[in-house]
Every structure is written in C-alpha cells, then in structure tokens.
Amino acid sequence: MNFLLIIGGLVLLILGGNWLLKSAVALSLKLEIPKIIIGMTVVSFATSAPELIVSINAALIGKSDLALGNVIGSNIANLGLVLGITLLFGTMEVQKSFYKTDWPVMMIASGLLYFFLIGDHVIVQYEGIILFSFLIIFLIFLLRFQKTAVLDELPEDDEPLPLYKIVLFFVLGGLGLWGGSELLIKGATTLATEFGVKDRVIAVTVVSIGTSIPELAASIIAVVKKEKAISLGNLIGSNIFNILAVLGITSIITPIVVDDERLLTSDIFWMLGISFIILPLVFIPKGYRLNWKDGILLLAAYCIFVYLTI
C-alpha cells in the first residue's frame, strides 16, 4: 500500500510540474517578464508549497525537527540531487543575475537561518517576520529592477495561451504538486517509521527528497524543453522560498524548536556548504556554465550526506 502511495505521488508530481511550467512560460510571454523571474517567483512558490504544508503541519503537532529538517534537507536535495541529475541531461548556461542577486540572496537567507538557530535553538515569531519580510523585499527588487531585462529566446513550440488556460494549468499544476507530495510523504514516512528511524533522519532524507520531486520534475522538463533559465531560477528560488517563506510563515504561526542537535552540528553546515560551492562551480573551469562533471560532483556530495545521515 505504501509503495502504491509513493508511485501515485510521483506520477501526480511529474504531471503537476509539467502543467506548472506550461503556465509559467505562458505567463512570461503574456507579461513580457524574463523567464528567470517567473522561475524564481511563480514556479518556486508553487514547488515550495509541499514544504510549507509539511512544515506547518509538523510544527503544529510538536514535530519541529520534521519541519526544520524538511527544509534543510530539501535545500541540500535541490542543489545536490536535483541540480546534479538535471546537469546530467546537458550543459546549463548561467545568467549574470545568478551571482549578482540569486546566489547572494540564497547565502544571506541561509546565514540568517543559522544565526537565528545557533543561539537559542528556536525560530520565534519576530524572527519569522524578519525572514518573510526579506522575501517580500527580494521579490519587489526582482520585479522592479529586472523586469526590463531582455526576454529569453523562446523555443519554437512556445505559444501564447489565453488567460483562462494559464490559470487552469497553474491550478492543475499546484493541485498535482500538492496532492502528489501528500501521497508521497504519507507512503514514505510510514515506511521509514516502520524501521524505527528518528524524525530528523526521516525529514532530511525521505521527506526532503519527496518534497524536492516537484523541483526535479520541473527542472528536467525545463531542460528537455530548453527552458534552462526557468530550471536554474527555479532551484535557487526554491531554496530562498524554503527558508524565507516556509520557515518564515511556519515560525510566525508557531515557534520552531530544535530537538535533535545534529540539525545544527551537521545538517545545516551541509546546506551552507553545498549552497556556497555552486558559485565556484559556475566559474571553474569556464565561466557562466554548469556541465555533467559538476552534476556528478554534486550528486556525489549528496550521496555522502545521505550515507552519513543514515
């Protein structure tokens, strides 16, 4: 039964990722907004919805390690697992906005999370408000200063859609991602619990991989359709959203308390490290691109993380 839930969840997530990407590309065409911004806002918010639902539910029932571990694990999985696998499908050109805004904001958000947790091992309401406010400022900056950027070159099969179809695909995509994640998480956590594994271990491995499937689906579909701007923007944006929106909103609703010390002595350093290493990978050996060698390195790092965690 649990395996059926996992398979059903995966199918829904892949369909949802495709529908969401379709609506995002159509929206960028209609509004003449660069697709990197659509990737970092519309797509990122929808693909971060599973983490938000999981984290709020977990924190409300007193399982804060599941809420926090889910986000930290998802951020590691997004760059180690998802970006790693995506790069195996081909070279990814990187825009200058990556090192000018996207990467620095991701590192600042990660640093803020570490700073809020390291002292008292809890994220309280006012800290949640700071995190969420930073997200709003970042989004306003993106839309204010990057809207005039040149529209990315579009594949031949892209065509404008009427507004009702854009909304329909967006709603279907969001529902597919949410429903698929619910099924996947339910099946996976039940399986993991049967083996007597801790909440934190379940969160940073099984649950985080499950909630990162939307990013994987959206990114692979984006690369296959040559929508590489959305692919990278989606992953960086999703990590920013996970910290600033998911943990921000969750801690505004209820404090997130750390019970398992390894979240702060191991997991969060893995998240900071794998986030940082993306910058040198983009510039070495040739600037503004990532290739299959980088993908193998990221996947290897992720496998080591999972091995050490389990």
Image (spheres, grey):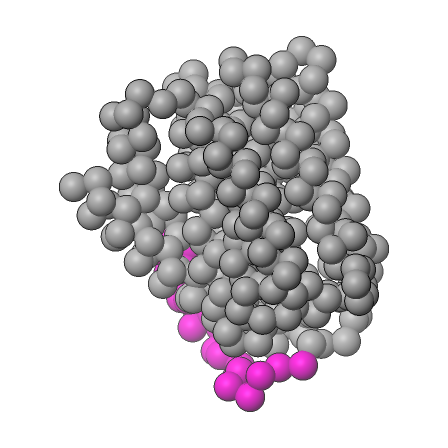
* Quadrant housing residue 118: top right
Residue 10 visible in the snapshot: yes
Image: magenta residue range: 153-176
Q: Would you say 202 lies left or right of 3 here?
A: right
Q: Residue 268 in the image: state x and y as whole percent.
A: 63, 29
Closer-to-camera residue (24/226)? 226
Residue 238 visible in the snapshot: no
Extreme left residue here? 1
Q: Is residue 66 above or below residue 226?
A: above
**Image point 63% across, 14% down: which residue?**
121
Q: Is residue 234 above or below residue 197?
A: below
**Image point 58% across, 56% down: which residue?**
296
**The N terminus: image quadrant:** top left
In the rendered image, residue 170 lying in the magenta stretch gets the answer: yes
Q: Residue 116 in the image: state x and y as whole percent.
A: 70, 21
Closer-to-camera residue (197/310)? 310
Q: Is residue 83 above or below residue 48?
A: below
Q: Residue 76 in the image: state x and y as whole percent.
A: 58, 41
Q: Residue 269 in the image: state x and y as whole percent.
A: 66, 30
* Quadrant housing residue 257: top right
**The C terminus: image quadrant:** top left
How many marks the image carries: the answer is 0
**Image point 62% across, 52% down: which residue?**
297
Closer-to-camera residue (26/287)? 287
Q: Would you say 2 lies left or right of 155 here?
A: left
Closer-to-camera residue (72/23)? 72
In the rendered image, residue 189 lying in the magenta stretch gets the answer: no
